C-alpha cells in the first residue's frame, strides 16, 4: 500500500489531482481505512506488529501528501504571479442606484407645500365601510351620485375598497370635534372603471379638509391657487369650474393648462388644453353634522386631488398606466 500510494502521489500533476488521491486513500471508503479494518483477520499474536506497521504507513502517506500539496500550491501561486497582470486602472462597473418612485416624490412635494401652509398629515384606512365612503358623505343607499364611483365590493357585506379619500374627512372630524381642523389625507383609492391613459383602477388621492369659524369659498380658492403656483410654477394657468359633489355645496373642479408646446396636448386633454387635477367645495352642512360639528357655528372646505394626474402635467407624461408598470426605463428618468 505504501509504495502504491507514493507512486500514485508522484503522478499527480496539480492540486485537484492531489485532492482526488487524498479521497482515494484517506476518504471514508479509502484504501487506508480498508487496510486498517483488516486487523481483525490477523492472528492475535501478530496484531501489535501489524498495528504499528499500519500506523507507520499511514503517517508516511499523510506527510508525503502534505508536502506534495504545499508544493502544488506554491507552483500555482508562482504561475499566477508571473501571468498577465491585473489592470487596476480599468473603470469599474457602476452598481445601479435606487431612487424614489415619482409618486413618492410628488407626494413629498405635496406634503411640503401643505406643511408650509400649516396643514397636518393624517392617514386613513383603504378598506372602508359603505357608511363612511357614501352614507355619511350625504349619499344614502340608492343615491344616484353613487354611480360617480364604480365601487369594488368585498365578500364582507358593507366593507368596500374606498373609492376616494373623502371618508377620511369623517374620521378626522369625529376625532378632532369641536376643534378647528386643517389636514391633508393622502392614500390609495380603488375604482372599478375602464383603464385608460388618464384613469387607473388603483390611484393616489390627497384629501384636504379645513374646518373653523368663518372659513369661506375665498379661503378655498386662495389655498388651491397658492398650492398650484408652488407645485407647477407661477406661469401655469389655474381654471376653476363649478361642479357637483353630494358632500360639498357649492362644488368646484380645478384644471391646470397643459404645456402649449407639448405635441400630446390635444390627445391628453381631449382638445381642451386643460387637465382636471381636483374636485373641491364647501363642506355640506349634513357632512359637518355627521362629523359632530354644528353647521350654524363653523364652516369648512374640502378637496380631493390626484397626484398622478399632476405628475402627468409636470412631466408631460402621456399615459397614467406607466406609474404602476414598474418599468425601470420609465422610473429611472425621475
Ligand atoms: C372625488 O373623488 C371627490 N372625493 C373629490 C372631492 C373631495 C370633492 C372633497 C369635494 C370635496 P373625483 O372622482 O373627481 O372626485 O376625483 C378627484 C381627483 O382624483 C380627480 O380630479 C383626479 O385627479 C383623480 N382621479 C379620479 N379618478 C382617477 C383615476 N381613475 N385615475 C387616476 N386619478 C383619478
Image: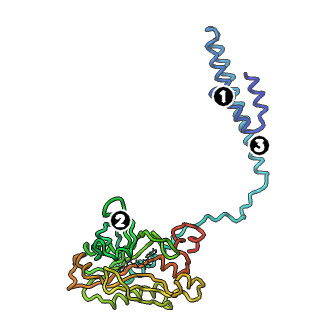
Number of the label disc, if any, that sits on residue 26: 1
Identify the image quadrant of the C terminus. bottom right
Number of the label disc, if any, that sits on residue 75: 3
Q: Is residue 252 left or right of residue 57?
A: left
Residue at point 24%, 86% (across, down)? 213
Residue at point 61%, 8% (across, down)? 44
Q: Is residue 62 left or right of residue 235?
A: right
Question: Does ligand 1 reach within 8 Å of label 2's beta carbon?
Answer: no
Q: Badge 2 is on which residue? A: 160
Q: Image quadrant of residue 124?
A: bottom left
Q: Percent position (x, y) of residue 186?
A: 39, 73
Residue at point 25%, 72% (across, down)? 175
Sequence order check, earlier mark of 1 and 2: 1
Q: Percent position (x, y) of residue 1?
A: 73, 21
Q: Please identify, in this view, whether the residue under mark 3 or under mark 2 is nearer the observer.
A: 2
Q: Please identify, in this view, whether the residue under mark 1 or under mark 3 is nearer the observer.
A: 1
Q: Percent position (x, y) of residue 113?
A: 42, 82
Residue at point 28%, 82% (across, down)? 284
Between the residue at mark 1 and the residue at mark 2, the CA separation in whole angstroms equals 70 Å
Disc 3: CA contacts within 10 A as few (<14), some (14-19) or many (>=20): few
Asked if the residues shown at circle 1 and circle 3 are in contact, with their CB atoms under 8 angstroms apart, the answer is: no
Sequence order check, earlier mark of 1 and 3: 1
Mark 3 element type:
helix
Disc 1: CA contacts within 10 A as few (<14), some (14-19) or many (>=20): some
Sequence order check, earlier mark of 3 and 2: 3
Q: Image quadrant of residue 98?
A: bottom right
Q: Regarding ligand 1, which quadrant of the image does it lie in? A: bottom left
Between the residue at mark 3 and the residue at mark 2, the CA separation in whole angstroms equals 73 Å
- Given residues 15 and 170, the one toward you in this image is 170
Q: Height in image: 202 above or below 282?
A: above
- Given residues 99 and 175, the one toward you in this image is 175
Disc 2: CA contacts within 10 A as few (<14), some (14-19) or many (>=20): many
Amino acid at each position: 500500500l505504501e509504495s502504491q500510494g507514493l507512486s500514485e502521489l508522484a503522478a499527480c500533476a496539480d492540486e485537484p489531482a492531489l485532492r482526488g488521491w487524498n479521497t482515494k486513500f484517506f476518504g471514508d471508503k479509502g484504501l487506508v481505512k480498508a487496510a486498517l479494518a483488516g486487523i481483525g483477520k490477523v492472528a492475535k499474536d501478530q496484531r501489535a506488529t501489524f498495528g504499528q506497521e499500519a500506523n507507520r504507513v499511514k503517517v508516511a502517506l499523510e506527510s508525503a501528501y502534505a508536502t506534495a500539496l504545499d508544493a502544488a500550491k506554491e507552483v500555482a501561486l508562482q504561475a499566477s504571479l508571473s501571468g498577465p497582470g491585473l489592470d487596476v486602472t480599468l473603470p469599474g462597473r457602476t452598481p445601479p442606484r435606487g431612487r424614489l418612485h415619482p409618486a413618492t416624490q410628488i407626494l413629498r412635494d405635496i406634503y411640503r407645500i401643505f406643511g408650509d401652509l400649516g396643514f397636518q398629515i393624517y392617514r386613513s384606512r383603504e378598506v372602508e365601510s359603505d357608511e363612511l365612503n357614501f352614507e355619511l358623505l350625504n349619499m344614502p343607499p340608492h343615491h344616484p351620485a353613487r354611480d360617480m364611483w364604480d365601487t369594488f365590493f368585498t365578500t364582507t357585506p358593507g366593507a368596500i375598497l374606498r373609492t376616494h379619500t373623502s371618508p377620511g374627512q369623517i374620521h378626522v372630524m369625529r376625532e378632532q370635534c369641536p376643534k378647528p381642523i386643517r389636514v391633508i389625507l393622502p392614500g390609495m383609492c380603488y375604482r372599478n372603471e375602464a383603464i385608460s391613459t388618464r384613469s387607473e383602477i388603483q390611484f393616489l388621492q390627497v384629501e384636504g379638509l379645513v374646518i373653523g369659524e368663518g372659513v369661506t369659498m375665498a379661503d378655498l380658492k386662495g389655498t388651491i391657487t397658492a398650492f398650484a403656483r408652488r407645485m407647477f410654477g407661477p406661469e401655469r394657468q389655474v381654471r376653476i369650474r363649478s361642479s357637483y359633489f353630494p358632500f360639498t355645496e357649492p362644488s368646484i373642479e380645478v384644471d391646470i393648462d397643459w404645456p402649449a408646446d407639448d405635441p400630446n396636448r390635444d390627445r391628453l386633454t381631449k382638445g381642451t388644453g386643460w387637465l382636471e387635477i381636483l374636485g373641491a367645495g364647501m363642506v355640506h352642512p349634513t357632512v359637518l353634522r355627521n362629523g359632530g360639528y354644528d353647521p350654524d357655528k363653523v364652516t369648512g372646505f374640502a378637496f380631493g386631488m390626484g397626484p398622478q394626474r399632476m405628475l402627468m402635467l409636470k412631466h408631460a407624461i402621456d399615459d397614467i398606466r406607466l406609474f404602476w408598470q414598474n418599468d425601470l426605463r420609465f422610473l429611472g428618468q425621475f
